[in-house]
Image (cartoon, helix red, strand yellow):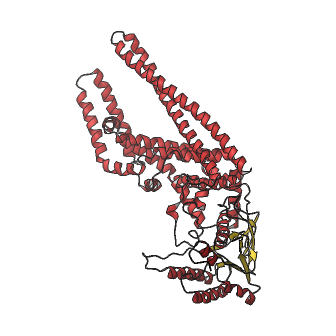
């Protein structure tokens, strides 16, 4: 599909969901009005029943109708929220097609100025690759996507498996949006997942002990029996209240441990319901790719188990109502009953819970890449190789609009392993380095890349493009850059194969020292198993090709001055740049006088 066809696709679906949403809202209003009418009629019959007892027989019927209406209202409200999420998803995608990703999490918390490449390549932050790809709604899903962008796959089998899964899910729009809409239903807090982990590891203090199993059965039966007997016989009430007091005392004796237990699972019902819905969608999906089939198998029956856990967690939360807590603990040992049931659930399913959550997060990441694939049908899935070879045709930056993107071809391999890229300011050198880097990030995640052909090496990546000083670490800009270069050399010495992207080496020193140091560094990099791209204004680095013609290639981006106007074509050319533009721009802007 073309970009306009994609927009039309999303717009049509938005209209359809909005129509359904209008209908659901109308039904909710009708049910609410009927429920109010039933409640008023119930009250009226209670009043009239004092003079006509036969009317009281209608009260149970009205009560049943009222309960049914409440359940129906709850289901319709859930449907309304789901449809609202689907409308928002489609409207957000329409904006994304115009290059506006502001509705998606930018992953600013993942920005790390010391990372080997993510900061230089704008992987995280506003307008970043993460923001363009991210469609995850669980905190864990976003964290997993961030880890994938920061630590690339080095196994061709994993890359192939992810390519198959992403391609399959890209074609399943309903599935992707179901996962996304379900994930939007409940906002997670940062410590929810950790609290569930702690709850799993919390030792059971009731379940598995016969004393508690028997006590939780006998005490409530005895107390309720005494209540029944008290209604028909005098003199029994004192025994009933003794039984109630004993139950309160029994609960009070365990109150500290009950509270500790509850704090881990407290108010997790809605989150667990969300997880259950997502797992149900994963289980119900019909897949052919090995990765998605595996995830679907892991989700088998998980929705029922988590729905059960959600119900138990919600029931235990009822103890937060102090009046109800006092009443039901006196009759039923309520707190201990549900702690026992939760501990039983945990003993039976605890080992699976972590895997179920991982399944949700993995599916979210695949779906995020699937949406990225669907929205960019012109992108292709790359080949990967272990020969330290990068070959691209029609390579462009995936976040630059297709109407403005200028594609380039590039080849670099273990024979001619160093590219020296010269050019004027703003000619496209840095963007070209980022274009290569960001497409490698996508390729080594199993995602499609912005190219007509892309053969990507299984290789680690290092960059030196945006080194910054640090007052906190008492580190100057120049020293920070030296540290970055030192870490690259140490990695090479350890035997790692690297793709290295460097922009203006040694920017923090004088031109003579910078030139000497840059030349010496490039000479050293030739000796290691690396693919190196160096962008520079220093034309002297171009002389290295004469010394190492089989190892180093010169490339450039040129600027043109036509009718006193500066033009860039952003096309990579062979050779050393011949035109610079700093003086021209300074004159043009009136910074220095025109002679």
Question: In the image, is residue 292 above or below residue 470?
Answer: above
Residue 481: x, y in percent?
54, 80
Residue 373: x, y in percent?
69, 55
Q: Quadrant of residue 544?
A: bottom right
Residue 42 appears anywhere in the view: yes
Residue 262: x, y in percent?
38, 48
Q: Is residue 209 left or right of residue 492?
A: left
Residue most extreme to the front: 595
Question: In the image, is residue 203 above or below residue 90?
Answer: below
Count every numbered label the image shows and give the total.
Answer: 0
Residue 294 appears anywhere in the view: no
- Residue depicted at 33% across the width and 33% down the height: 222
Question: In the image, is residue 176 above or below residue 537?
Answer: above
Residue most extreme to the top: 52
Between 251 and 320, the one nearer to me in the picture: 320
Q: Is residue 293 left or right of residue 38?
A: right
Q: Quadrant of residue 85?
A: top right
- Residue depicted at 64% across the width and 52% down the height: 98
Q: Quadrant of the C terminus?
A: bottom right
Q: Quadrant of residue 127?
A: bottom right
Between 459 and 309, the one nearer to me in the picture: 459
Question: In the image, is residue 351 above or below residue 513?
Answer: above
Residue 246: x, y in percent?
27, 39
């Amino acid at each position: 599909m073309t970009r306009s066809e994609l927009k039309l696709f999303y717009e049509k679906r938005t209209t359809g969901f909005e129509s359904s949403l209008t209908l659901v809202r109308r039904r909710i209003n009708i049910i609410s009005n009927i429920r109010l009418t039933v409640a008023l009629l119930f009250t009226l019959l209670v009043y009239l029943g004092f003079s006509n007892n036969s009317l009281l027989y209608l009260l149970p019927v009205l009560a049943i109708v009222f309960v049914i209406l409440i359940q129906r209202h709850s289901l319709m409200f859930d449907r309304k929220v789901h449809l609202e999420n689907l409308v928002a998803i489609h409207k957000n995608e329409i904006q994304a097609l115009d290059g506006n990703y502001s509705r998606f999490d930018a992953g600013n918390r993942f920005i790390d100025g010391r990372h080997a490449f993510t900061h230089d390549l704008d992987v995280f932050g506003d307008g970043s690759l993460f923001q363009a790809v991210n469609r995850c709604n669980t905190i864990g899903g976003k964290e997993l996507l961030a880890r994938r962008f920061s630590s690339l796959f080095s196994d061709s089998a994993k890359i192939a498996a992810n390519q198959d899964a992403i391609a399959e899910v890209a074609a399943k729009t309903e599935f992707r949006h179901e996962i996304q809409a379900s994930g939007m239903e409940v906002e997670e807090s940062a410590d929810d997942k950790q609290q569930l982990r702690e709850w799993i590891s919390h030792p059971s203090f009731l379940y598995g002990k016969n004393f508690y199993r028997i006590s939780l059965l006998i005490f409530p039966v005895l107390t309720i029996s005494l209540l029944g007997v008290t209604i028909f016989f005098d003199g029994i009430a004192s025994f009933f209240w003794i039984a109630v007091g004993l139950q309160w005392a029994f609960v009070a004796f365990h109150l500290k441990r009950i509270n500790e237990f509850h704090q881990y699972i407290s108010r997790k019902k809605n989150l667990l319901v969300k997880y259950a819905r997502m797992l149900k969608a994963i289980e119900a999906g019909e897949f052919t790719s090995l990765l998605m089939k595996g995830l679907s198998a892991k989700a088998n029956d998980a929705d029922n188990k988590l729905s059960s856990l959600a119900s138990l967690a919600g029931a235990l939360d009822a103890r937060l109502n102090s009046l109800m807590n006092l009443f039901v603990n006196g009759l039923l040992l309520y707190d201990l009953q549900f702690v026992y049931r939760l501990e039983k659930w945990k003993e039976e399913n605890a080992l699976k819970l972590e895997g179920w959550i991982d399944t949700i997060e993995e599916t979210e990441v695949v779906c995020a890449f699937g949406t990225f694939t669907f929205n960019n049908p012109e992108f292709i899935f790359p080949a990967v190789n272990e020969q330290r070879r990068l070959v691209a045709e029609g390579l462009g930056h995936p976040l630059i609009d297709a109407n403005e993107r200028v594609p380039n071809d590039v080849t670099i391999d273990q024979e001619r392993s160093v590219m020296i890229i010269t050019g004027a300011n703003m000619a496209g050198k840095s963007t070209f380095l980022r274009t290569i880097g960001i497409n490698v990030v996508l390729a080594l995640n199993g995602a499609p890349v912005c190219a007509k052909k892309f053969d990507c090496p299984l290789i680690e990546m290092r960059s030196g493009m945006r080194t910054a000083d640090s007052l906190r670490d008492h580190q100057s800009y120049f020293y920070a850059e030296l540290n970055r270069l030192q870490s690259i050399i140490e990695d090479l010495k350890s035997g790692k194969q690297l793709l290295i992207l460097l922009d203006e080496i040694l920017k923090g020193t004088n031109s003579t020292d910078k030139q000497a140091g840059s030349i010496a560094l490039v000479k050293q990099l030739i000796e290691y198993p690396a693919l190196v791209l160096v962008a520079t204004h220093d034309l002297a680095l171009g002389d290295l090709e004469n010394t190492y013609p089989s190892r180093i290639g010169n490339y450039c981006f040129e600027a043109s001055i036509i009718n006193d106007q500066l033009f860039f074509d952003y096309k990579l050319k062979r050779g050393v740049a011949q035109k610079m533009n700093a003086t021209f721009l300074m004159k043009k802007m009136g910074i220095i006088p025109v002679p």
